[in-house]
Amino acid sequence: MKEENSMNRRDFVGKAATALAGITILPRYVLGGTRPDGSRYIAPSDIISLGFIGTGKQGKGLINSFLGTNESRIVAISEVYKAKAQLAQERIKSNYEKNPQLGTYSEVPVYTDFRELLARKDVDAVVIATPDHWHAAMAVRAAEAGKDIYCEKPLALTVKEGRAMVNAARKYNRVFQTGSMQRSWLEFRQAAELIRNGYIGEVKSIKVNVGPPPKPYDLPAEPIPEGLDWNTWLGPNAPVAFNSELAPPISKDVFPNWRNYREFGGGMVTDWGAHMFDIVQWALNMDDSGPVEVFAPDGKEHPFLTYRYESGITMTHEKWDWNNAILFTGTEGELRVQRKKIETTPASLATKVIGENEKHVYKSENHYKDFLDAMRKRSKPICDVEIGHRTASVCNIGNIAYRLNRSLQWNPKKESFKKDDEANALLGRSMNDVWGIKI
């Protein structure tokens, strides 16, 4: 009897061992859930597949930022400069080697024509990091293709292109994040909440110190480098001669200077202005509107480019002690803010804890995760396309006032200038039939 029981036990143990041998112990991240520190494991089925359009200086940083979330993978690239695409591929491959939870690395294909990337069914969203003259033409097509969109700031080269981007995102129900990542930074959120809660009293004036407006393209012709498809780089624009200031080689790790020329960018008024005017719009709760007048510098009443909001608040584009920064002046104090720095008068406001029952703005601590979370929830992210468009419009109408050298009345509801055909003609631009869109 004992022998029979013993044999039964041995038989059971043997069968159990055999069964266990067939079980694979899965890493926790495969199943999803929460880590001990409170952060989330992301199951492979929840990792979002991105297509990157543009992998130059800004694109390189965005690759790091999105892969750094451990919530996305890059499955395709569109790039017109071969050397830059190769660098991006190497960067992505290195990230996979360091982060096995993202899955097994497979070669990331490169397309010169971004429409081929949009045609891929495995692309959930696109990241657009091209020069500004391409943004609208790419974003509208991406929305039509059913892709969610992260597009760099300034959102659009012209007001009408920005509105076309909003219309496309809404028509096709796309999640659209503008790359104004300062909204996900503590010092700017603190500034916005202090202003909205009246901690410096009634705001009277605002100074925004960013660089100058753009100028017409005037660089001399240089040989087009091997591996650059110059015609596709130009895209919807009229042909101009190549110069390496527009598309520098990989040996120069710099931000290219296309942003300084009217055909491709809006100068520093849009390049840095799209960051700093954006924070003003946020703090003033004007994300769906804008100023009603813009005055060109006249050396008299308006020594600097000056905006006026309907509330009477004035905002000037002028130099003051801090570069790329904002100075709010109110009836009861001042607030100065730039990246990684906020100072207030009185000084205690800089670290003031905003009460639970006071006014709060949308809180995001990671601009890229916020976009991915919004994709999963099908909600608007912290810097939705309408917000990005409104901020870019502030910059663009300022550049129009600079260009015409006169003052303009702006209707933010109709998005047009009052009784000014010449100014209204500059709200859009002509684009070629190959790459242009209807605006």
Image (spheres, grey):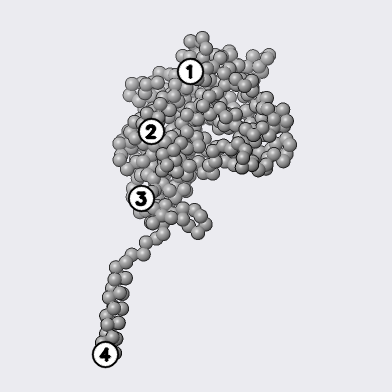
Q: CA distance from mark 1 to mark 3?
A: 43 Å
Q: CA distance from mark 2 to mark 3?
A: 22 Å
Q: Quadrant of residue 438?
A: top left
Q: Which residue is mark 4?
A: 1
Q: Which residue is mark 3?
A: 45
Task: Label 2, secondary structure: give it.
Answer: loop
Q: Nearer the viewer, residue 91 or 296?
A: 296
Q: CA distance from mark 4 to mark 2?
A: 73 Å
Task: Label 3, secondary structure: give it.
Answer: helix
Q: Earlier in the sequence, mark 1 or mark 3?
A: 3
Task: Tell me what residue is drawn at x 36 percent, y 36 percent.
Answer: 147
Marks 4, 2: nearer the viewer: 4
Task: Label 1, secondary structure: give it.
Answer: loop
Task: Tell me what residue is drawn at x 51 percent, y 44 percent.
Answer: 366
Q: CA distance from mark 1 to mark 2?
A: 23 Å
Q: Amino acid at mark 4?
A: Met
- The local crowd at label 1, few if under 14, some if 14 to 19, many if 20 or more residues have their Cα within 10 Å, is few
Q: Earlier in the sequence, mark 4 or mark 1?
A: 4
Residue 173 is marked as 2
The answer to whether 10 appears left or right of 331 in the picture is: left
Marks 4, 1: nearer the viewer: 4
Q: Nearer the viewer, residue 3 or 303?
A: 3
Q: Nearer the viewer, residue 334 or 421?
A: 334
Q: Earlier in the sequence, mark 4 or mark 2?
A: 4
Marks 3, 4: nearer the viewer: 4
Residue 129 visible to an observer of this rendering: no
The answer to whether 104 appears left or right of 58 in the picture is: left
Task: Label 4, secondary structure: give it.
Answer: loop
